[in-house]
Image (cartoon, helix red, strand yellow):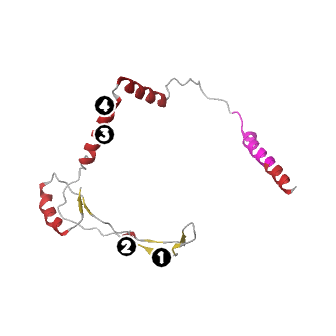
């Protein structure tokens, strides 16, 4: 009996929740002249173009061109317009954060207590050294040649 009354209560509550927004709505009219939308649905336009490319056999050609363009861009990205420094500077940062409250996993294991200072560089170690440089600048290459023999795992970009 209790379950039935609970269900009835929830049904009535849900009904009133649905009516509540309608009861506060009012017609404020419209301002100015309205016009029908005459544009095509963009999804339909795209699908029609894809279908036309597929029917003409050009879809594979377009796809191949896009793949080649993406590969070229990945191998030689557009360079940033950064000037060469005249006086080198070193900036040291600490990405460490102090945890403001206890952090728990969903299954109840404590990850960090409140007040714990965590530096991700101490917890996650990079397996490779990454060096980003401008290979078009001939002045960079001698310095790079001095660095590379000392590093065992190296990726150059």
Q: Is residue 22 one of those drawn in magenta?
A: yes
- Residue 101 in the image, given as x and y percentages of width and height: 54, 72
Look at discs 4 and 1 and give the one toward the viewer.
4
Establish if 34 lies above or below 20: above
Mark nearest the camera among 4 and 2 is 4
Under tag 3, what secondary structure? helix
- Give the residue drawn at x 13%, y 59%: 141
Instruction: Mark 3: give few (<14), some (14-19) or many (20+) Cα within 10 Å.
Output: few
Residue that mark 2 sits on: 122
Q: Which mark is residue 59?
A: none
Q: Tell me the residue that label 4 is attached to.
A: 61
The reply to whether dot 1 and dot 3 touch (C-beta < 8 Å) is: no
| Rendered image: mark on residue 116 | 1
Q: Earlier in the sequence, mark 2 or mark 1?
A: 1
Query: Element type at marker 4?
Result: helix
Mark 2 or mark 1, which is nearer to you? 2
Counting residues from the start of the chain, the first of labels 4 and 2 encountered is 4
Alpha carbon separation for disc pair 4 and 1:
56 Å
Quarter of the image where the N terminus is located: bottom right
Q: Which residue is mark 3?
A: 67
> Residue 91's quadrant in the figure?
bottom left
């Amino acid at each position: 009996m209790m379950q039935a009354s609970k269900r009835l209560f929830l049904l009535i509550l849900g009904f009133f929740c649905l009516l509540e927004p309608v009861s506060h709505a009012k017609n404020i009219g419209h301002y100015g002249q309205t016009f029908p939308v005459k544009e095509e649905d963009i999804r339909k336009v795209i699908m029609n173009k894809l279908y036309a490319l597929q029917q003409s056999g050009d879809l594979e050609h377009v796809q191949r061109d896009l793949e080649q363009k993406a590969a070229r861009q990945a191998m030689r990205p557009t360079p940033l317009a950064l000037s060469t420094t005249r006086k080198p500077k070193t900036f040291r940062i600490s990405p460490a954060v102090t945890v403001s409250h206890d952090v728990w996993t969903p299954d109840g294991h404590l990850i960090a207590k409140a007040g714990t200072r965590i530096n991700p560089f101490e917890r996650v170690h990079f397996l490779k050294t990454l060096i980003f440089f401008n290979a078009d600048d001939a002045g960079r290459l001698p310095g790079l040649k001095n660095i590379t023999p000392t590093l065992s795992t190296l990726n150059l970009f």
